[in-house]
């Protein structure tokens, strides 16, 4: 019985062991599966890690790129800002260093910018005037020292108009009571059709004025000095010729007459030179007054009548019926008439014709036309005929008295008066004479201030 | 016979002054002479001449200053005065001065015959 029992125990153990082994196998299998799974997971993780590393690397590269781009951009912005600042500073420096005085105002007339020259000119500091009314801090006056009223001050009113204004007669008195004349150019600043302010350019013209004055004084003095001995010769010769101090014999009379006439020529030359000098110095006075053109012309013709008759010239004068009185300087107009008429008389041979006509040309102009059957002006010299001291070859030997100044003076006067002068002289094999045209504005002359 | 009219000649240039004096004597005027503006003003105010011929550029006192002085006087304010000069009124100041002090005429010596100046004087005195 004991044996049976023993057997059965070992069987049980074996059975148990088998069972255990089976269980272990199952566990092992499970473990193997798990291990496999783990291995797979590990592999997957490894792959993911690799991928992540790739991404990370890519990100790092991108970040580096971004960093570089950013740095470049920042540098560019910095450079650009610097260059903009530089150019702004440069522009400001240019504005502020302009040799002329510069002042910029807003549309209300408050000063925005004043440059160094203007500071120096007016004796004011930028900080004291910027933001203040131009007319208050920089009061301008006229030649006589009177303040220029607001309405009359073109420099102030310029921003409300659209064109530049220049007026030569402005003065400024500094705080130290020194005064200077200024040339001012005031221009509105226009943006999108709106006036947003004004620019004023100032220049101290003391020096120019002094030069002008010196020139005028020279001309005046020269005229006085040259004319005095001429007057002496004139007057004494005149008294002798008139028999005021006794009767002269024929020979004496003839000689003295030569002296008198030569002297007269000198007087005319000096007068012509003076006219030229005055025109060039710009001090030619224009004093317009209502002038009867036809009457004035007739009196000029009457003056020349002896010369016209002496040469047996046929002379006609036609004054248009619509021509009435106009604003003109009779003195200057007379000079123009005298010159062109005496030229026609001088340069037309005996028995020739001269026709003078005055008429309206359109509504705005007066046209003076003088036609002669004279020597004409050689083609190759026609462009020089208004040049100072020029005399055409074909008349030099015919009339030795000419100064070569007449037409130069006429042209200067006519152009100063806003008119024009031209001529036609069809000079070929046959001489066809000359026609001079002078056109003058009917609304008359503006009175000159200097 | 009509009383002789007195003409004051204010002129610094001897030759011109003598020519004017000669013609005035010849034409039966009574000339008074002054060689500069200062003497001219003195004589004018003391003698009240019928007419004054006044040069412009002169020593001591120039003609324009003299004219101004004479015009300030009650008699001188309306006295006939002819500026007889060789100075063209080409600059604005001279022209403005001449306008302000109202000379009867402004004549340029070298453009005027002596006989024509006398005619001018006669016509002024006749009016």
Image (cartoon, rainbow, N blue to C red):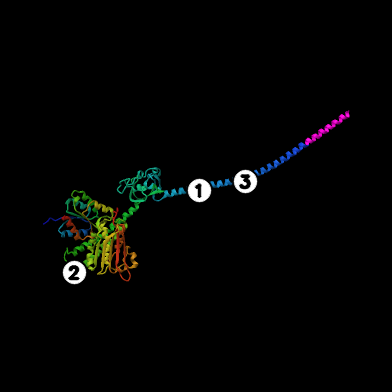
- Badge 2 and badge 1 in a common chain: yes
Q: Secondary structure at mark 1?
A: helix
x and y, in percent, of residue A67 in the image: 57, 45
Give how far across and how far down residue A116 sits, in percent. 40, 47
In this rendered view, identify the residue nearer to me: A287 or A26: A26
As drawn, the label of residue A58 is 3
Secondary structure mainly formed by the magenta segment: helix
Judged left or right of residue A42, residue A377 is: left
Mark whose residue sits in front, 1 or 3: 3
Return the residue at label 2.
A250
Determine whether label 1 and label 3 are within 8 Å by CB: no
Circle 1 residues within 10 Å: few <14, some 14–19, many ≥20 = few
Left or right of A376: which side holds A52?
Answer: right
Q: Residues within 10 Å of mark 3 (few under 14, many from 20)?
A: few
Task: Pick the residue in front: A388 or A356.
Answer: A356
For the question of whether residue A65 can be seen, the reply is yes
User: Residue tagged by mark 1?
Assistant: A80
Count the marks: 3
Label 2: few (<14), some (14–19) or many (≥20) C-alpha neighbours in 10 Å: few
Of the numbered discs 3 and 2, the one sitting upstream in the chain is 3
Distance from disc 2 to disc 1, alpha carbons, whole Å, reads 98 Å
Q: Chain of mark 3?
A: A
Q: Residue at x 66, y 43 (%)?
A: A48
> Is B67 situated left or right of A393 in this image?
left
What secondary structure is marked by label 2?
helix
Q: Chain of mark 1?
A: A
């Amino acid at each position: 019985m004991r044996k049976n029992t023993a057997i059965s125990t070992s069987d049980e153990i074996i059975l148990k062991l088998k069972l255990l082994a089976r269980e272990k196998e199952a566990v092992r299998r499970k473990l193997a599966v798990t291990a496999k799974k783990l291995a797979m997971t590990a592999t997957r993780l490894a792959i993911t890690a690799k991928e992540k590393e790739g991404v990370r690397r890519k990100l790092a590269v991108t970040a580096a790129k971004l960093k570089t781009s950013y740095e470049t951009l920042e540098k560019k912005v910095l450079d650009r800002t610097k260059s903009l600042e530089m150019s702004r500073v440069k522009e400001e420096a240019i504005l502020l260093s302009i040799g002329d005085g510069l002042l910029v105002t807003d549309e209300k007339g408050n000063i925005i910018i004043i440059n160094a020259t203007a500071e120096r000119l007016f004796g004011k500091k930028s900080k004291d005037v910027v933001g203040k009314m131009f007319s208050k801090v920089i009061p301008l006056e006229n030649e006589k020292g009177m303040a220029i009223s607001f309405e009359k001050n073109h420099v102030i009113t310029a921003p409300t108009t659209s064109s530049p204004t220049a007026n030569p007669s402005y003065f400024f008195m500094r705080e130290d009571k020194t005064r200077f004349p200024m040339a001012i150019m005031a221009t509105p600043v226009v943006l999108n059709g709106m006036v947003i302010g004004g620019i004023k350019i100032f220049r101290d013209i003391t020096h120019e004025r002094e030069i002008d004055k010196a020139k005028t004084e020279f001309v005046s003095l020269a005229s006085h000095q040259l004319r005095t001995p001429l007057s002496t010769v004139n007057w004494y010769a005149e008294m002798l010729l008139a028999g005021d101090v006794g009767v002269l014999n024929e020979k004496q009379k003839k000689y003295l007459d030569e002296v008198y006439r030569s002297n007269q020529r000198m007087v005319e030359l000096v007068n012509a030179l003076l006219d030229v000098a005055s025109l060039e110095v710009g001090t030619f006075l224009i004093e317009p007054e209502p002038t009867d053109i036809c009457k004035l012309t007739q009196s000029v013709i009457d003056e020349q009548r002896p010369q016209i008759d002496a040469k047996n010239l046929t002379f006609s004068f036609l004054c248009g019926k619509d021509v009435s009185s106009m604003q003109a300087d009779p003195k200057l107009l007379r000079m123009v008439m005298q010159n062109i008429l005496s030229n026609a008389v001088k340069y037309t041979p005996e028995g020739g014709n001269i026709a003078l006509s005055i008429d309206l040309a359109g509504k705005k102009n007066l046209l003076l036309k003088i036609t002669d059957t004279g020597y004409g002006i050689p083609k190759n010299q026609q462009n020089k005929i208004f040049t100072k001291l020029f005399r055409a070859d074909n008349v030099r030997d015919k009339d030795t008295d000419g100064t070569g100044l007449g037409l130069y003076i006429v042209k200067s006067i006519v152009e100063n008066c806003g008119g024009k002068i031209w001529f036609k002289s069809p000079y070929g094999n046959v001489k066809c004479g000359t026609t001079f045209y002078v056109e003058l504005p009917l609304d008359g002359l503006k009175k000159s201030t200097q | 016979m009509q009383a002789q009219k007195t003409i004051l000649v204010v002129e610094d240039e001897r030759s011109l002054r003598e020519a004017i004096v000669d013609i005035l004597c010849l034409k039966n005027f009574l000339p008074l002479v002054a060689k500069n503006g200062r003497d001219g003003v003195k004589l004018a105010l003391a003698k009240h001449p019928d007419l004054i011929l006044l040069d412009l550029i002169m020593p001591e006192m120039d003609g324009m200053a003299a004219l101004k002085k004479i015009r300030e006087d009650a008699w001188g304010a309306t006295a006939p005065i002819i500026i007889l000069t060789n100075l063209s009124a080409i600059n604005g100041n001279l022209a403005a001065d001449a306008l302000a002090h109202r000379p009867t005429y402004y004549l340029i010596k070298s453009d005027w015959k002596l006989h024509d100046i006398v005619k001018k004087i006669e016509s002024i005195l006749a009016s």
